[in-house]
Amino acid sequence: MKNYQKILIALISSVLLTIAWPVWGFPIFIFFAFVPLLWIEHRISQGEKGKLFWIAFLTFFVWNVATTWWVWNATPAAIAAWILNSLFMTIVFWMFHITKKRLYNNNWGNFFIIPYWMAFELLTYHWVAKWPWLNLGNAFSTCHQWVQWYEYTGLSGGTLWILLSNILIANTLISHLEQKKRLRNSFLASSLAVVILPIALSLFIYHHYEEKGEDTEVIVVQQNCDPWNEQFDSEFYRETLKRNIDLADSLITPNTRFIVSSESAIQEGIWWDDTESSWSLQELNTFIEKHPQTSYVIGATTHDWVPKGMEDDFPARQIGNTDHYFYTRNSAILIDTTGYQHRNKSQLTPGVEAVPAWNFLKKSSVTIGIARGTLKTDPTSHNLNFGGHKVAAAICYESAFSEYVSTFVKKGADLIFVMTNDGWWGDTPGYKQHFEFSKLRAIENRRCVARSANTGRSGFFNQRGDVLQPTAYWEPAVIRETLKANTEITFYAKHGDYLSKIAVGASILLFIGLIIKIILDSIKKK
């Protein structure tokens, strides 16, 4: 087989991965999307010539660009994101190939990709270039009825399912082409069982699950503003907040416990040492005084002074040439009759809210003008409290982090609020994909989710991941729903990404085995 033929076959994997991804809505293709690439890897591992590293890189690069091209709307750093993420995926695939070729160069060696890939996905949550958007388990967000067992495994269970299915189908194909009928039949039967049985189990759970918890009335406001492209002045932020309050006031009842608004809904910029001078907070306080049964949960940019001796902290920003430094934070604020509670975003968007801790980048901007440098984060998650409820306020990008969202639930959150500004994506698949991911957070934690987006799409999600009252994009909207506030902790929320952590251990053992094999082979040659 010629090299260009290998490339064309491998690119079929790019196409299948792309159309399986939200929001195309064809997740069935994810079960065999890796098969063409695995077949090419098999041919090369058996001695055919071919530059597997670059074939794999091209495959993953096409998939990355085709599914996340909209990141360009926020920052030119999108190019780096596409290249780096594709490179990381390629390195993982290359490590699998080398390990297989050295340790077990046959169909059974294909299973080595599972621990390597799952370990890589765990890293996407924790290293500097945090980008879990393309973690494989996200593919089922458009078909959440198939993965109700995420309450036991989390997103990593979906990744394991996808990889195992692809390997078994690839092994079926390879055995057929090599005329190994008995092995082919075994792999075929296993493939069908691995694909069908989890879906059947999930559908059973879906149709028999009963929501739990206390009825809690929640209002979601979509004020419809795009702070990335609006003029920052007092008229803009006053008009935006007034629209927000008017929308909430139009639907509030004596039973309303929470009003949820979006990330960046307060555009004024709040200093915590001078809240009394904030026009926005005073307006919200006036509203709450009229409705003391309610709390208002809203997003804001906040500032506070850097403590003496902490001036070298990377997120610290200097005021001109003075010796005064301050932090900027992306915050969720809960306002009730007793005052203010807040938490700050911890999982920052790479290139938009966070840049590497390199001195030459400290005062630079790699965004289109709002976030400069890196924001100050909270070291750990904590809930906001009102009326006997603990709520998780996940700010924008944080809702893509499975285990992180579950830490709020582990600490007692009975509802999840997703507060996001999706305006910078424009009318692209970006905001639609982000919306779909909330289904998976609802299932993993068996928590109802209230989602407020600046420009849409907003909505509610029940504990099975079903969408309730989704709003239209780029239209002011306000919706109200009675949600169940569940206090039971799911297996996944309690134990976190245990499957991925097991995969890390297995990857380390495989790597050690690879090194030992290389050393032994080297000794034999001497």
Image (cartoon, helix red, strand yellow):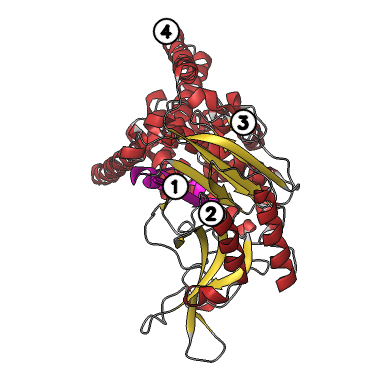
Mark 4 neighbour density, 10 Å: few (under 14) some (14–19) many (20 or more): few
Residue contact at pointers 1 and 3, CB within 8 angstroms: no
Return the residue at label 1: 391
Where is mark 2, residue-wise? 297
Q: Distance between the residues labelled 1 and 2?
A: 10 Å
Earlier-in-chain disc, 3 versus 4: 3
In terms of depth relative to the viewer, which is nearer, 479 or 368? Answer: 479
**What amino acid type should be assigned to the residue bearing mark 4?**
Arg
Q: Would you place residue 330 above or below residue 522 in this image? A: below
Up-down relation of residue 422 to residue 25 (above or below): below
Q: Give the range drawn in magenta.
A: 387-412
Residue to which mark 3 is pinned: 20
Disc nearer the start of the sequence (2/3): 3
> Which one is earlier in the sequence, the residue at label 4 or at label 1?
4
Mark 2 or mark 4: whose residue is earlier in sequence? 4
Earlier residue among tags 1 and 3: 3
Helix, strand or loop under label 1: strand
Residue type at mark 2? Answer: Val
Give the percent coordinates (x, y) of residue 526: 25, 47
On the picture, is 197 further left or further right than 525? right
Q: In this view, does 312 lie above or below 377?
A: below
Verify CB contact (< 8 Å) between mark 4 and mark 1. Answer: no
Q: Depth check: 162 or 233 in front?
A: 233
Give me the disc on residue 182: 4
Q: Which of marks 2 and 4 is in front?
A: 2
